[in-house]
Image (cartoon, rainbow, N blue to C red):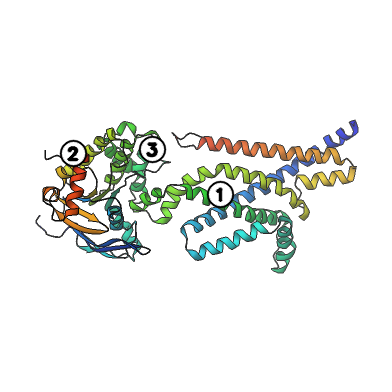
Amino acid sequence: MADNTPTLRIENMTKWYGDNEVLKDASLSINKGELKVLMGPSGGGKSTFLQCINFLVKPDRGRIWLDGTEIVRARKKEIYNYRQKVGMIFQDFNLFDHLSALHNVRIALVRVKGMSKGEAQDRAILELDRVGLKSYMHQYPAELSGGQKQRVSIARALAMDPEIMLLDEPTSALDPELISEVLDVIRDVRSGGMTMIMSTHQIGFASEMADEFVFLEDGSIVETGPPEKILYKAQYARTREFCSKITELYGNSFS
Amino acid sequence: MMESLSILYGALPYLLKGSLVTIAVVIGAMLLGLVVGISIAVGQVYGGKWLHRLASVYIWFFRGVPLLVLLFLFYFGLCSFLNINLSAFTVSIIVLGLITSAYQSQIFRGAIMSLPEGQMKAARALGMSDRKAVMLIILPQALRLSIPGWSNEYSIVLKDSAVTYALGVAEIMARAHFVASRTYEQLPLYFAAGVMFLILTYLGTKGLRILENKVRISGYSS
């Protein structure tokens, strides 16, 4: 990296639900082209953290810089612009149910980015082709499998030309035999140099792809480090215990 | 018997003209109810506390006061108090429209709330403003789900429209009443009026059923 400004920098992100502090001073910084994987037990704050990053959940405290520019939350327009640069993939896909695959990808290009319909259409088809679903472009979400839905949602995010993508357990809602088709697409996007923060339990995939593991528990970032270190030489007993359990469950790629 | 039938036959064009007035009142009221109802529903779901309270008072009022009272209140009361000159026809559309808007708002609100939360989240995540998300993502789905309830509301407003005869709107009931009281042929005339309402109910609900099938999202069964 010629310039040392991280693509995204998050400082002291904190979120309370009532009396419950679900995210405690989480800070993270990610450089262009990096993949950081959030790990940890369910309810540990991974999803809240990801959703706070693009303000789908309003953090109570915390600052965010994209390419060195701080996002001012009070300015709605600024948030809308920022979100266009931050692609989001949800666990349960969240495709727009009343729109075909093509229109799911196209709608924000036309109505948010202001592209012409023809240009947006071409781009949408290109992105659907990239995830291997060009021939499904006229299908509606209810006619697609879970794996196909998630691939459409990835195409929808990519079409916006995001600078970074947030993936919130992208394969957790999928039948086991559909997981690999989605992981293949993510791997492909990753090899294209996309900057990503992903939460997942797919430990094998994560350790093969990630630059860094971020272990979250009870809303706190407990430990960060390269995959091998977190998996085998974690500093904290709890991290070690979690990693050994999850490795047992999902296998790992180092073996 | 033959005489009754010939009177009815003679009065039929007059009654049918009344059905056009009925149709105009009902369509006007349903459309007003649609626009106001959607606004209230969106305000209730996405608006603040204050908007929610305002909507509650509005709904409480228009669901609580009888139609006849509201018609008189607006036509004889408000119009002369505010010194505005509105026809009975216009006032009927407004009053029926405001009442049905209170009911329709709850149909739409239920439909909006039945949509998965993720729809709104995904729209926001793409950089849509709340307004765009509601217009492009939420309402197109919620309105589809609302058609059966809306069809029900249509049949209620259609029947309620007969009450506007009390203001002298020349709809089906007013015309049937007028002929009946002149010819003393109450039975055939009120019967004919009833049949005309039945036909209009059938046509309207049938039309909405067709619309429902037409806009059904591919892959969904029901």
Image coordinates for residue A249, horizontal then vertical, percent? 22, 40
At 75% across and 63% down in the image, what residue appears?
B76
Tell me the CA gap for discs 1 and 3: 25 Å
At 47% across and 60% down in the image, what residue appears?
B47
Q: Picture quarter containing residue A253? A: top left
Q: Kindly check if marks 1 and 3 are in contact, taking CB atoms under 8 A apart as contact.
A: no
Tell me the CA gap for discs 1 and 2: 50 Å
- Residue at mark 3: A141
Q: Which amino acid, mark 2?
A: Gly
Q: Chain of mark 2?
A: A
Going by the picture, which residue comes out furthest to the left? A2
- Residue at mark 1: B107
- Residue at mark 2: A251
Image coordinates for residue A10, horizontal then vertical, percent? 22, 61
Residue A194 visible in image: no
Describe the element under mark 1 as helix, strand or loop.
Answer: helix
Q: Chain of mark 3?
A: A
Image coordinates for residue A50, horizontal then vertical, percent? 28, 54
Image coordinates for residue A89, horizontal then vertical, percent? 29, 47
